[in-house]
Image (cartoon, rainbow, N blue to C red):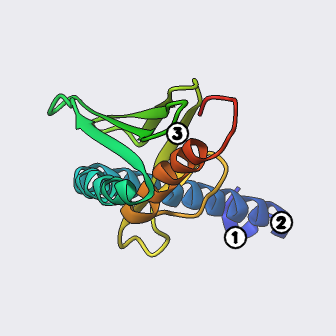
Amino acid sequence: MHQVLAPKWINDIAAQDELARMQSNLTEQETLCASLTVKAEAPGFMRQLFRELALNAEPLSGIGITESLSDSSEPEFETRWRLQVALTGALVPRFTYINIFHLIHESTIRCHTLGGKVFNLHFAVRPEGSAIGLTTDSSLSLMNPEQSAQFIVKPMVDWIRSRASKIY
């Protein structure tokens, strides 16, 4: 039957189906665009994150904490960093570390602590599409490299300075 001669309710269903198909296509295009943006910008973000980790860790000596930030990455495969912090001058030494891993072209950064805590940071594109940031499993707020470094370092320092018995 010709579309014009079909009852209105059938034309409405056809229009809804077409709208759903177009929205699905748009979502696929947005996802592809976001994926390509992350792929293009992640290397620069990771370089800046490493600098920010160093900038957050180096001044810790001012509060009696030593730090060590190392890079054992394999270019073109995986980023591998370790940040270790230790309370100096304590009768009972306290230290902890975090290993940070990022497979090239993946959208997740894996973080593993001395105490076995594992968490992921996820690359996401800012709503305006201008840049990327990181989100956590528990928050969709996008963090820039500076905020991401603080998110990683501050809990380590808080644990080192506390009297908590559970290892971070």
Q: Which residue is drawn at 48% across and 49% down?
A: 152
Q: Which of marks 2 and 3 is nearer the N terminus?
A: 2
Marks 2/3 in contact by CB < 8 Å: the verdict is no
Q: Among all residues in the image, which is located at the extreme left?
A: 75
Residue 81: give x, y in percent of width and height: 30, 35
Q: Which amino acid does label 1 sit on?
A: Val
Asked if 167 appears above or below 41 in the picture, the reply is above
- Residue drawn 44% across the image and 33% down it: 97
Give the quarter of the figure containing the N terminus: bottom right
User: How far apart, in angstroms, are the residues tagged by discs 2 and 3?
Assistant: 53 Å
Query: Pointer 2: what residue?
Result: 7
What residue is at 39 percent from the left and 55 percent from the top? 60
Q: In this view, does 18 lie to the left or right of 150?
A: right
Q: In which quarter of the image is the C terminus?
A: top right
Q: Quadrant of residue 5?
A: bottom right
Q: In this view, does 39 lie to the left or right of 93?
A: left
Q: Closer to us: mark 1 or mark 3?
A: 3
- SS at badge 2: loop
Q: Disc 3 marks which amino acid?
A: Asn
